[in-house]
Image: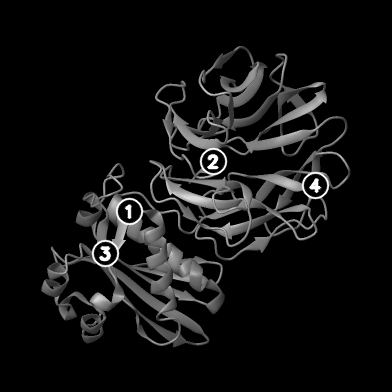
Amino acid sequence: MKNLVRGTLSVLILFLSVSAYARIYIPIDQPSDQKFPIAVCNLTGGGPSKDIPDIIRHDLELSGYFNVLPLNAFQNQAEREGITADSIRFSYWTSIEAQALVKGSVESQGGKYVATLRVFDPYIQEMLVGKQYTFTKKELREVAHRFSDEIMEALTGIRGVFNTKIAYTVVTRRGGKDIYIMDMDGENNARVTDLKSITLSPAWSPDGTTLAFTSYTRGSPDLYTINTNGKGIKQLVGGKGAKITPSWAPDGSRIAFSSSMTGDSDIYIISPTSSKATQITKAHGIDIAPTWSPDGGVIIFSSDRVGGLHIYRMSASGGESTRLTFVGYQNDMPNWSPMGDKVAFAGRDMGTFDIFLMNPDGSNIQRLTVGTGSNEHPSWSPDGRFVVFSSTRSGEPAIYLMRADGSNQTRISKGNGMLPEWGPRIK
């Protein structure tokens, strides 16, 4: 057993099955119409015994990888069993074709809660993973998301991203714009900026502590940084011209952005601890929306240097650039997958924006959205399995999530939202 403590939340690792982790139950490239049947039981005990499994069920449904079996199909049987392998009638669970089973308990203890959560394979009658969490009521959602991450890792071999955050821009009632952060499932909305101005385009630092963004709070669009708790705002680049579309390098040492400080909009790079920026593009026309390769050596960006807005790539140290897109008349907002194999972007070829994927060399372009309003600003999850984006399909712009193959497109923001940026994993 191993005990981990993060803040006031402590985690006891009860069991990790080496043989189970060596088996991949759900291949990452599994077709979206072949969902994995899983039963998530309510927990025994009191307190948040229903809240935690409800959150886990929603997480798994949101992922698009699971067929979460309806609770009424097995609840009576679940209540007759315990949470240990010797108390579970595995033949029942295989008869309803549940390929994984989630069980657990929760109890009050010294003003906190203790939740014991386990995943079983009913066919081999083995516990795949078991965790025990000691937590406060405020940490309940984190516990549920963390165990959803454990389920994903046990069944796919790659840890989930349910305990990550998404930053995005909200149009306020005053008509301005501010930056908010929410959980991956759209809950726990928290306002980060309140500048009574137009504030937009949040970009996460790799350690998840800081956001870079653009704001008109001093009259012109300047570049700022702020801690994710809303404190420590700092102007990074001011002066002449617009400073927009910031993007952090994977190692956190640099921020790329677009600026018109010398006339044309070009791509610049700056250290987050400096005020001196280095210009890396000098071609005629507008260069915007830089995104870094996972190794930090290459930048992909959008440019209208040949007329329509298209996507280019170049060394992060500058030099010659290579055009990647040749179809459509406006290709913008590229975002490089953390896995390095794909670039998502927003393109227009039929009047409104849609989300596309391509290889980093511009080959194999695939359309992920079509006929559903304007779909813009894609951003990858840290595991490269999901894309978050904004869409007007319901009228107002809102934040949606989908699998990287375009399936399971689901609205996650409760109100309006645009310019989403997926944050890094929480350690």
Q: Is residue 102 above or below residue 178?
A: below
Q: Secondary structure at mark 4?
A: strand
- Mark 2 residue type: Pro
Q: CA distance from mark 2 to mark 4?
A: 27 Å
* 3 and 2 marks in contact (CB < 8 Å): no
Q: Secondary structure at mark 1?
A: loop
* 1 and 2 marks in contact (CB < 8 Å): no
Residue 378 shows in the view: yes
Q: Earlier in the sequence, mark 4 or mark 3?
A: 3
Q: Which residue is mark 1?
A: 65
Residue 321 placement (x, y as % from top left): 59, 15
- Mark 1 residue type: Tyr
* 2 and 4 marks in contact (CB < 8 Å): no
Q: CA distance from mark 4 to mark 3?
A: 47 Å
Q: Earlier in the sequence, mark 1 or mark 3?
A: 3
Q: Which residue is mark 2?
A: 378
The answer to which of 105 and 361 lies nearer the viewer is 361
- Mark 3 residue type: Ile
* 1 and 4 marks in contact (CB < 8 Å): no
Residue 214 placement (x, y as % from top left): 75, 42
Q: CA distance from mark 1 to mark 3?
A: 10 Å
Q: Earlier in the sequence, mark 3 or mark 2?
A: 3
Q: Which residue is mark 4?
A: 234
Q: Quadrant of residue 183?
A: bottom right
Nearest to the eye among marks 1 and 4: give it: 1
Q: Which residue is mark 3?
A: 38
Q: Is residue 37 above or below residue 250?
A: below
